[in-house]
Image (cartoon, rainbow, N blue to C red):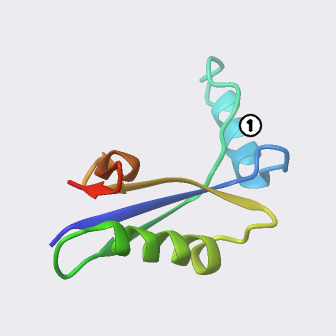
Amino acid sequence: MPTIVVEIMPKAELLDPQGKAVAASLGRLGKSRFTGVRIGKRFEVTVDGAVDAAVLAEVRELADDMFSNSVIEDVVAITVDGVDAAELTVAGETH
């Protein structure tokens, strides 16, 4: 069964207090080469059957309407078993 992975991140222009706290901790641990951390969310959706354009459209809708808060978050990636979902649809064709 294929798994579709949806990655959500806070909008770049917004503060990320969790990421800021982790970045500060890295500095205290002597990991000074890392200057910033941003923390997001990952959803894994298992699909019963093949992944086609309709399934990807439905997952995109879920990502926009349910998984993310569009005011403060962006859907940054949708992949299928490690393949960028954009690569699965070429000229209206699903691979």
Task: Name the secondary structure under disc 1.
Answer: helix
Q: Looking at the picture, how far across and down is residue 19, in whole percent?
A: 70, 47
Is 79 situated left or right of 15 in this image? left
Q: Looking at the picture, how far across and down is residue 83, in whole percent?
A: 29, 47
Is 5 situated left or right of 73 in this image? left
The residue that mark 1 highlights is 24
Q: Is residue 40 above or below residue 49?
A: above
Q: Is residue 30 above or below residue 25?
A: above
Front-lying residue, 4 or 93? 93
Q: Residues within 10 Å of mark 1 (few under 14, many from 20)?
A: some
Report which quarter residue 55 is drawn in: bottom left
Front-lying residue, 31 or 48? 48
Residue that sits furthest to the top in the current view: 33
Q: Residue at x 25, y 68 (%)?
A: 51
Is 33 situated left or right of 17 in this image? left
Q: Residue at x 61, y 30 (%)?
A: 29
Q: Is residue 95 above or below residue 52?
A: above
Residue that sits furthest to the front in the current view: 91
Total marks placed: 1
Is 86 situated left or right of 8 in this image? left
> What's under tag 1, amino acid-wise?
Ala
Report which quarter residue 57 is drawn in: bottom left
Q: Residue at x 74, y 37 (%)?
A: 24
Q: Quadrant of the N terminus?
A: bottom left
Q: Residue at x 58, y 75 (%)?
A: 67
Q: Looking at the picture, how far across and down is residue 40, in whole percent?
A: 60, 56
Q: Quadrant of the C terminus?
A: bottom left
